[in-house]
Image (cartoon, rainbow, N blue to C red):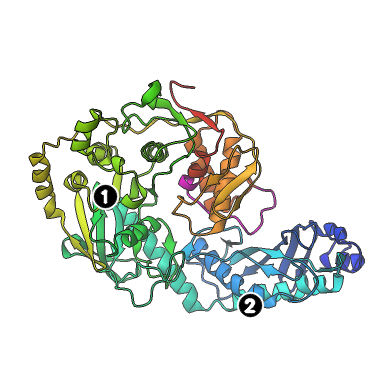
Amino acid sequence: MISRDDISSILRRIDGRGYKSYSELRGASESVDGVHLKVTKVQGDPFAPPSVVEISTVLRDGWRVDIEPIPLADLIHRQLSKTLPRSSMRGVGEGKSGVLAVPTPSPIMIPRSAVEARPLGGGGWRILARVWVGLPARRRRVLGREALELLTSRLVKGFRDALRDLDARRVAEHARAWVEQEFLRGLLRREGLVAFVGDGSILPRKCGGCWEPLEGAVPFESPPSLRLEVELPTGRLVSGMVVRRGVTTIAGPAFHGKTTLAEAISWGVWNHIPGDGRELVVSDSDLVYVESENGRWVSCVDVSPFINYLPGGVDVRCFTTRDASGATSIAASIQEFAEAGASGFVIDEDETATNMIHRDVWAEEVTGKRTINPLSDMSSELAKSGLSIVIVASGALPLLASSSEIVVMDEFRARDASFKRRDAESALENIGYRRVSKRYERPAERLVAKPLHLEKPRVKGFVAEARGLRDRVDLRPLKQVAEEQQLSTSVRVAAVIASRRRAPIARLAREFSQRLWSWDYSFLAQTPGPDISYVRHYEILYVLNRLPGLEACHTGYC
């Protein structure tokens, strides 16, 4: 028996009325043959962002219970992104009328608000999806019959089609990829490694910004001296190149695959879907990509290990600026991420201030000053604190000499040139180069000293903006995010933390990231849409630390 508040009865009642009448659907629900629908958000206009409907069901008979929830939810999300557009009502009404959609997922497996999969006691799964629905209208009048078909027929069909197409082979393949990558990541931690690059991996992408692997690309082959064979829990025996803790320099001629290898390692913090080509490229989840960012905001960061002094008596132990230079910006980024628990950094010389990579002794003689302690000098001190570096650098002799390992990329093939370190050391001695470094300790955690209250934080392109923000934040250097929803989620969570006085910045970012991992979005929205994606606390901190006007402080300065 249908109650007065069921979706169907409401749509029949408001058919033909003004579009605002759709607001009566908010909170309404209905069950259709074992599938439950609930309207959680109603758009105010047919041209506004679509409404949100939660759709759920329980799967029991014949469903495996020995798989992880995240890869299962990820696979269902991918199916929905294909079946929902086919179920949409094209050509009905105006604006976004008739739309059924979820965000298109990238080739990584992460928790997303679009689909949740939770195991049930006694076996089976509860599947919950959040879908964008364009409630149909013509001349801003409710098309009740069309809306009824869209919600109770087409949406339900698209949802069922997505679940029906999940054959046992695809579910097993997706689950296996997750298990293998998680196993390798655990191996890294146990064996003191930063990354594993599997033999046969296809590292290059089809084009800049493309997700698909490049057809005809040279499969990766590990140098014998750096090769490790691993038996995976699925029974497969694989091999690949290990990247050990310390400093690994990736060298070689231009256009021979140096940056491609570094990018693959930086993306290895995520688990990849089958067919991506990088399923066996796995990195420590606390590895962070950094680069120089001229003009970025910095608030009370201790850059003293890298910057000896700055003009005008600027305090390098609480460095604050609206306009960081190439060197000070990357020093600040390293310290901010080290404060948050990073295990190492991926750096590309093409995106980094040269004076942060190595010193030029002849230039020092000309200027008579040494203001920077570069990575080549600080590497051993960083290693003592558990910070590793994977860096693309072909022409930095001091860095090559201080490297733990040197990997040369030659026509997209890797070879171990670590034995060349001794030659580099001898060359440095001949020119009188002497390393000068400071004792390194990870910086103290900072607090929000002066809150920043932002309204409607959002992302447009690769720029974050909000009411109450002095200036927009450039998100292009945030290289370890795979989809737009990760960018917007990072911005929204950063805005929450920025509003809290005395909030421990790194600790709160980690807590919120862990909640995202568990599909807990209550700190962001009571009724979330399908557009929230998991991000590490490092992505959140990237945005938070660059919010113009946010003031932070650490021990001795609060």
Between the C-alphas of marks 2 and 1, the distance is 45 Å
Q: Nearer the viewer, residue 437 or 53?
A: 437
For image coordinates 48% across by 55% down, the residue present is 481
Query: Please, is residue 548 above or below residue 179 in the view?
Result: above
Label total for image: 2
Q: Give the percent coordinates (x, y) of residue 199.
A: 27, 69
Asked which secondary structure carries label 2, the reply is: helix
10 Å neighbourhood of mark 1: few (<14), some, or many (≥20)?
A: few
Magenta stretch: includes residue 108: no
Residue 283 shown left or right of residue 12 in the figure: left
* Corner quadrant of residue 383: top left
Q: Main secondary structure of the magenta part?
A: loop
- The residue wearing badge 2 is 161
* Corner quadrant of residue 50: bottom right
Determine which of the numbered discs, if any, sits on residue 192 in the image: 1
Q: Give the percent coordinates (x, y) of residue 105.
A: 54, 65
Figure quadrant of the N terminus: bottom right
Query: Please, is residue 65 above or below residue 482 in the view?
Result: below
Asked which secondary structure carries label 1, the reply is: loop
Q: Nearer the viewer, residue 235 or 339?
A: 339
For image coordinates 35% across by 69% down, the residue present is 234
